[in-house]
Every structure is written in C-alpha cells, then in structure tokens.
Image: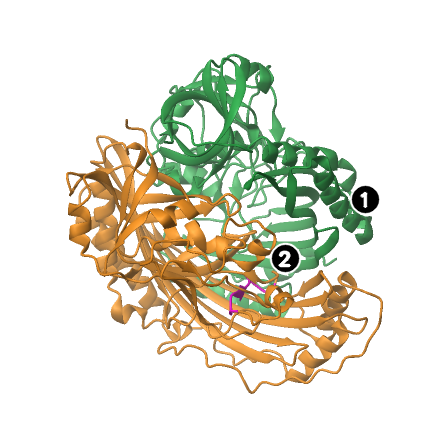
Chain colours: A orange, B green
Amino acid sequence: MMSVDDRPERLLDPSLLHDTIHTALRTGGDFAEVFVEDRRSMSALFDDGRVEELTGGRSRGAGIRVVFGETTGFAHTADLSPEGLRSAAEAASAAARDGRGGDRSVVLDDGQAPRPGAVAMMPADVPKARKVALLEEADRVARGEDDAIRQVTVRYADSRRRIQVANSDGLLTGDDQVRTLFSVSCVAAGDGGMQTGRESVGHTVGFELFDRVDVADLARRAARRAVTKLDAVPAPSGEMPVVVGPGGGGVLFHEACGHGLEADLVAKSASVFAGRRGEVVAAPFVTLVDDGTMAGEWGCYAIDDEGRPARRNVLIEDGVLTDYMWDHLRARKEGRDSSGNGRRQSYQHLPMVRMTNTFLAGGDADPDEILADTERGVYVAQLGGGQVNTATGDFVFGMTEAYLIENGRITAPIREGNLIGNGPDVLRDIDVIAGDFAMGSPGTCGKDGQGVPVGDGTPTLRVTRLTVGGTAA
Amino acid sequence: MPELLDIADHVLGWVDDGEQVEVCAVHERETEVRAYERQVEALTVAESQGVGIRVVRDGRQGFAHAGTLDLDVLAETLAEARDNVAFATPDQWCAVAEPDGVAPVELDLHRASLADHPTGAKVAAALELERLVGDADPRIVGVESAEYVDSITESAVVTTTGIRSTSRETGCYLSAYVLAGEDGETQTGFGFSIGREPGDLDPERAAADAVERATRMLGAVKPDSARLTVVLDPWVSAQFLGIVGSTLNGESVLKGRSLFADRLGEEVGASSLTLVDDPTDVAAFTATASDGEGLATRRNVLVEDGRLLRFVHNSYTGRRSGGASTGSAVRGYASTPGVGIQALALTPGTRTQAELVADVADGLLVQGVSGLHSGVNPVSGDFSTGAEGLRIRGGALAEPVREFTIASTLQKMLQDVLEVGGDLEWLPMRTAGVSLVIGDVTVSGA
C-alpha cells in the first residue's frame, strides 16, 4: 500500500526562511512573516449502503505577509523553491510598499518552539481497510437500530497539518497538528415525513481516538435521534425559558459573546462588547474561558498560525468581562502580547482573531432540579450551528434535538428550528448553571470566509428568556 | 499561465489498461483589497491551483487531489487515487462521464481588461467605496469592511472517455459592510456590486445599498409574535432558492434525502412559480458553458407553473435514475463531481417591490436572514431562520424590526407564494434574487 506520508519530508530550511523575510523587507516594512504549511488529508465516505469513495488530499505552500504602518501586504505560493518564495515575498512587499527602502537584519531563533501534541497512532500509518471497517460497522448498527432508518451516511476523516512560522522579530517555530473525525448521519421516515439525526466526534489526536470512541454507540445515538424526531411536534413560537443540556451549550456562548470578544471586531467598534472590559456583563457565577491548550480537543494546538503558543484565556470571570482575544497584529498596536488566537484556514489566508475551545465553567446546581424548577419552556439536548451579528449582538443557533418542558418535565420532542437572542441580554438572563460540564461536538467556525476547527463545552444551564423560532402558538 | 490541458493530458498519459480516469485542473489568480479608515488595510495577491484525479475500475472509484500542478506530485496523486479504488464497493452505475453529443453554448465570460487592470486602480476602487459610504450619511459611524475583489479562473476537465473541456472566466465585486449608529445603538448593512470586469461595477449603488440597509434599521424593535405575509428581499429569496435547489438534486432524490423524491409531475408550489436552472445565461454570476464533468451545461426547467418537471443530475445520478446527465455536475478540484443547481432563478413577475408592499395590509419586509445553515433542514423541510427587516402596515413600510425568527416548512412556503416580483437580480451565488411574497409565515418575537 502506498501512503502519502511514507516519504520523510521537512518543511523549509531556516536559511531559506531568513532570506525570504529579508526579501520581503527589502523595500521597507515594520514586520514580515513567512507561514509554511503542509497538509495531508484522507477521508472515506460510506453512503447509501456502500463505500462510495476514499479521497486523499495534499496541499503545500507558503503565505508571506508584510506590514507597513496600517497596511498589510499578503501573497501566497505553492512553489516553495527559493525562486517561488522570492517572487511571493516581492509581491507581498509591493502590496505593502512604503518606498523607504531598508535593510533589516533578522536573526531567527528556534529555541522556543513548544512541543506538538502527542499522537499515539499516526492515521497515515493505519491501513485504509481498518478505517473502512469502522464505516461499515457504524452503518450496520445504525440500520439495525430501527426499521424507520432509511438512509445512513458515515464519514471518516483525518488530517495532518504541519506548519512553520518565521518572522522579522526573530521567531522561528512550528507545529504538527493531527486531527481525526468520525460522523454518522441518519434519515428516518415515518407517517409525518422524514427526519434526520447526526452525531460526530473529532479530536486533535490520531487513530487512537477509536480506543475511547465506540462508533457503534455513536451510530445508535444518531439513529435514535432521527427516530425520536419522527414524533416531533411543531416547535413553539415566542419568548420562553430555555434549558440547554450539557455539552451542547458551547455554541450558544460561541455566538452570544465569543465572536464579540475578538479584538479585531472590537477595534472596529463592530462588537457590542467594545469598551466594556472590566464591566459586569453576566451573572456572578458565569466564567467563560477560551483555551487552546486543552489537550486533544478539536480546537487545540501548540502554537497558533502566527507562531504564538496557545493559551488559556479567561474572557469573563465571575460575570466580569476580563479580556478580549488577540492576534499578533491587533496586540502589537495595543503594545501587548497576543493571546495565541491568531489563526488561518490555510497558507492561502491571512490570520485573524479566532476562538479555540470555548467553554463555560461548571456551576453547582443539580441539572434535574433545573428542569423541575422550569414550569414551561424548551430543553435543547443538541444544538446545531449558529450565527451572530457582533455589532448588534443578535445571534441565532439551531436546535437539532429539543423537547418541550411542561410542568418541570421533559415531554414531547419538537421539530428543528432556530432560537434567537441578543448576546448581552442572554448573558444577563442566565440564571442557573449545573455541575455536569461536558465538551460538545467538533465544529467548524466560519469568519470572513475562513473555516477553522473549534471546540466548545458547557454544563446544563438555563436562560430565562430566549425566542424560540417555531410555528406553534 | 500554465497550460491546464497539457497538464491534464500528461496525467492521462499514465493511465493503465482497464481503468477510466478523469482529471480536473484549476488555476486561479485573485486580488483582494480591503480599505479601512481611508487606508489600505490589506492587499492580497494570490495564485492558486490544484488537480483532482478520479480513477474508476470495475465499478469502483478512488479519488485524490493536490494543490499543485507539479507533475511529480500528480504522479503520486494518481497512484493514491488508484490505491483508493480497491476499498470502494462495486457499483454498476459508477463510471466517468461519456461525451453526450450536446455542444457547449459559446459563452463570453472572460474579459482581458480585468487581467490588465492595474493594482493601483483596484486599490483606488476600494478606497473610493469606503469614502462614498462614509460620506453618505452622518449616521454612518464605521465601515467594518470595504473591499474590491477580483479573480481570473481557468479550468480543464479531461477524461479517458474523450471529454476535453476548458473554461476561462473573470469576475469582480465591490462590497461594503457598514455600521450606522444613533443614540448608542448600532445597526449594520451591506451592499455590493458584481461584474466580469471593473467597468461593470457600480460603487455608488454598493454604497447606497449598504447605507440604506443600515440606517433604516436604526430604532429597530423586537416585533410581537404573529402569522404574517412576508415579502422576501431579493438577497433573502436568493438564499431561500438555494435551499429549494438542494431538494431538487438527483443525488438527494436517489438516496432518499429529498422531500420531493416521489413528486415528479405533481404540483409542489403556487402556479406563479417557474424555476429554471440555466448556467448558459451569461447574466448569471455563476454562468458556465461546461459542468464539473466537462459536459455542456444546458437550460433545465425544474418547476413550471408550480408543477415539478425534473431534477438536476450528473452522469452518475442520471444513469442510475434511468436517464442522463442534465449537465449539472458541480465540484471543485478537491472533490468528486457532485450534483447541484448552477444558476437557478424564478421566472420574474412584473411588479416592483414597492408595488408588492403596497398590497400587503399587515406584514413584514425581510431584508436579511441569519442561521439558514442551522435552522433549515432540507430533508424534513423544517424552515426557521433569524431575520431583520421592516414591518409593513397598510401597504407602507413601517418600523424596523429585529431579533425575531420566521418559520414555516419548505413545502408550505412554496404553496404559499402569493406573487413573484419583477426585480430579478443575479447575486454572487448560484441563484438569482427576486422580491417574493409568501403568506402565512410564523413570526416569533416578543
């Protein structure tokens, strides 16, 4: 069997990086950076009762950024030869040109590079047949779960992303990021039409993921979710209390305030949280953290895509807004350190402020008591994606598994839909948090057309008032 | 500029007996200028390329892609695709597309003027857009982004079955995303202008739209929950059509994931609905003469006077459903050909948005939606999305409203279409927008 990772390969030689930075700054500039990326990926798709296809992918290239004053020039190339890099460096330089000319000396120091996450079983070394066997098992179990299951799609994907970052501050560092993902999607059909159920698990680890994840269990849960929803009643419409189950609620915070705490949006006054550092923005039991160091989680890494070590950043502590998230450019303007949140989708993109693993710290309430104490409302067991307008704070998130709460008890499943709220209002309206913290499903966060892997987590919590976007009175 | 056909032909030279191979090669050059506070915030000049190779042998397919045109890497990519073949389940319909005798329509989608346009003029266009927005209204307190973006894309699809297709196109747009503020409140709006060459762009219009959308939302309140007639703005109806299009996809139909799977020939919508997917319409931003398998694109009438006439197919789903491709394979180089609409539009009516609004006694003009990906399920048909817009009272636009959802089901919304406006507009997506009046939609607010 041939594997794309059999051939040992190194990213660029430090002297070549040095020369490229030198070229990038030849006509002036305050800062120059070379970001080199080598990505290998493999995915396998089981759909409609058969292995549909296996796909192998690779991409390799460098993005070069030159900052002069307020202007960033950026160019990228898939040609990593000295000529290719020189040409890209000149293009980036021309884009940011100030015309002053200059000859900065740069000394690259690679003594500081943090260690990448440990990978026990490199996915590229695992026979494809083992990956395919997981797909077949998940399909078999999902179809066997209930006669109502009509269609099953199972996807396995792994990726290895090696990066190298060098800049005119002398930084020279790198990382090796391995991620493995598995998802099961089911369609169930009944008298009332079709419903879907999905489960996914993804971690920044290798194939050892399956030592702790049982794909059969994942398949059963996806199937049961679709089948349960066949009996779903129309979702209610209007404002009511919403209880969000453990794990799922991270999306809520990601949208309600996470994006609004990104320093690039704050700097442009495009966030309702601009200028509010030090203020009380939530109840005293709310502590929100963005943590790129959570080993193995979907949004973790050793260094961000500007070469800064990942950090654990407390954004809201005991209800007080403590800090925003920062990338290098924004932090440099403020004369402070990056918080390790500068990320990019690939070498073809400019970095910007992005979340990593965003979670709400656990409280001490009993989740059963939270439900018992809720007369009427909605219980959301699994959230879908979401979207926010950071300038107004209005955000939505989808509910892919939800139930009515009647007289303190979970009753009928409800059909899918969005909930809508306003970030600052919702933070104030959280009135209780349980102690049953769990991380949620792996997500892809989109911003300005760039997608990056993110994680999130929450314990069970209640928002006293959210607008549920259903069709029932 | 590299010769994509030569590269693809080179790969085909490595083919073994008994295998079918399809090579899809893409090359793109892009410039992006972002202005902020009367300066260039970022200027990106980029060249990207890639090749996807699909191998089919004995009804099994394998695929691999690489972000390069380097022949040594492509040789490894072909080997990887071949290796992947062995793991697929045999499928009697699986094959690379065959030429189908349909001649591609000659489309003029490439403008040399864009390639020759100096970077300085692109920078000036972005700066000018930001200036126009900032000067338009004292209530504009910020510009989150003002951008000029262009691209020159070339692609080739070549197969062992005799397909050789190439395409070349240019495109550019201006977009502004602005912040309006008054009394401590902030609202946002965007505007854009698209074209094939810089001369097509209308910066005044992009600026005016962004400013109007943001300023008219100032003072927005949360509406009361109600069932109302809604008028979808073209920007919103185009996104709605994209979802409808995904349910008319031959792959979804074959795999039991389309709510219209058994409805061919039936009434699925109001009689005012005629839905045509026509990538040969040069006015469409996504116009293309050949599809992702290299077959000629064509005009496909999907729904006529409310009756479902056909689904879109690629060669696989066409064959498997007993017919043929409708020239509707969609893909990037990094994926195998899927199926999808390419340039979908409702046949427009005759009246302006203002005339449509004048007929609504109690309703809502929806100017923006959010969370379409999270609140709409194209399999079940459940539809729920965050929205903002203006209330309509007595046939006139009234107070701005925000932080509410609109909900129904896709099935019901198509039946509840009351009128299609005459203001058809191609947008930077695979669909065109038109003002669309839909009755009995649930508005969830306070």
Q: Quadrant of residue A25?
A: bottom right
Q: Is residue A119 above or below residue A187?
A: below
Horizontal side of residue A76 vs A25, given as left or right: left
| Residue at mark 1 to residue at mark 2: CA–CA distance | 28 Å
The chain letter for the residue carrying disc 1 is B
Nearest to viewer (mark 1 / mark 2): 1
User: Which disc, if any, is residue B113?
Assistant: 1
Amino acid found under the numbered disc labelled 2: Ala
Looking at the picture, does residue A182 appear above or below residue B341? Answer: below
Q: Which mark is residue B8?
A: 2
Q: Which image quadrant: the N terminus of chain B?
A: bottom right
Q: Which residues are magenta?
A: A339-347
Q: Quadrant of residue B319?
A: top left
User: Which image quarter: residue B136?
Assistant: top right
> Does B127 lie within the magenta span?
no
- Residue shown at the point (49%, 33%) measured from the top left: B388
Q: Which circle's residue, 1 or 2, is located before the other in the chain? A: 2
Q: Secondary structure at mark 2?
A: helix
Nearest the eye: B137 or A215 = B137
Labels 1 and 2 positioned on one and the same chain = yes
Q: Quick check: A127 left or right of B275? A: left
Instruction: Please tell me which residue is depicted at 48% across the width and 14% down the height of the picture.
Output: B360
Does the magenta-highlighted stretch encompass residue A345? yes
Q: Nearer the viewer, residue B296 or A232?
A: A232
Per the rendering, the mark at residue B174 is none
Residue A46, position in %: x, y?
Answer: 34, 54
Q: Amino acid at mark 1?
A: Ser
- Describe the element under mark 1 as helix, strand or loop: helix
Point out residue B37 in the picture as x, y percentages from the top left corner: 71, 51
